[in-house]
Image (cartoon, rainbow, N blue to C red):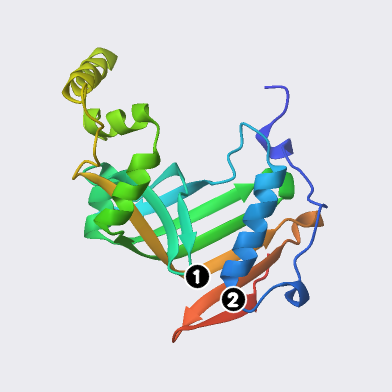
Amino acid sequence: MTQTLADMRRDYTRDGLSEAEAPLEPFPLFQHWFADAVKTEQPPVEPNAMTLATVDEQGRPHCRVLLLKGLDARGFTFFSNYDSAKGAQLASRPYAAMTFFWPSLERQVRIEGQVERVSAEESDAYFQVRPLGSRLGAWASPQSQVISGREELEQLLAETEQRFLDRAPHCPPHWGGYRLLPERIEFWQGRASRLHDRLNYRLQGGVWLRERLAP
């Protein structure tokens, strides 16, 4: 390594985040920041990519990167295999945290809350707009299960392609959406000398409370 980990650092000087420019509720600010990310971030960064953290029955955390596929006043929606490891974790402990990081904007958003499954109608509506390969993959892959090798996965896909040779694949019963119902949303704007701006929104009694956190 030509540079040690201790020497790796970047100073953030692009922008600031003040209470004067932040709304009293978090959703308008998230939508504004997300629109900025869509305009600003370049591949390979995906603006809707986020790290999702769940907890298993032993209290051990698990993280992975997923794509946000829906946002409205109810919460943040993503899709997965219900029989996957994350599906089992959410079934036993239906709480999660997600983090968005947009490096070009020097911004991060952290979201925490309870998770619920979306309706079958919502899952099917999204499933039908996915590329055909992704729909077939949702049927073929026993997500998070141990398999013998790539050849087994390709064989499962070939069998699935034959199964749906003359008809469009419908949404599998083991696949669908989750919605994170936010109870806390923190907006982080990088600032110089690590004195970052952090505005935290906390849901209390159905009302969002806004507060500044020390960096």
In the picture of the structure, the residue carrying the numbered disc 2 is 25
In the figure, is residue 126 to the left or right of 85? Answer: right
Q: Quadrant of the N terminus?
A: top right
Residue 149, placed above or below residue 107: above
Q: Are marks 1 and 2 in contact (CB under 8 Å)?
A: no
Q: Position of residue 173 (x, y in %)?
A: 18, 45
Tell me which amino acid carries mark 1: Arg
Residue 196, placed above or below residue 174: below
Tell me which amino acid carries mark 2: Glu
| Rendered image: mark on residue 184 | 1
Which is more toward the observer, 38 or 114?
38
> In the orientation shown, which residue stands out farthest toward the front?
166
Q: Secondary structure at mark 1?
A: strand
- In primary-sequence order, the first of circles 1 and 2 is 2
Q: Could you tell me which residue is drawn at 65 percent across and 70 percent down?
A: 199
Other-residue count near label 1 (Cα within 10 Å), few / some / many at <14 / 14–19 / ≥20: some
Q: Secondary structure at mark 2?
A: loop
Instruction: Name the quadrant containing residue 169.
Output: top left
> In the orientation shown, which residue stands out farthest toward the top?
151
Q: Could you tell me which residue is drawn at 16 percent across and 24 percent down?
A: 163
Q: Could you tell me which residue is drawn at 57 percent across and 68 percent down?
A: 27
Mark 1 to mark 2 CA distance (whole Å): 11 Å
Instruction: Name the quadrant containing residue 159.
Output: top left
Q: Is residue 60 shown to the viewer in this render?
A: no
Q: Position of residue 48 (x, y in %)?
A: 54, 46
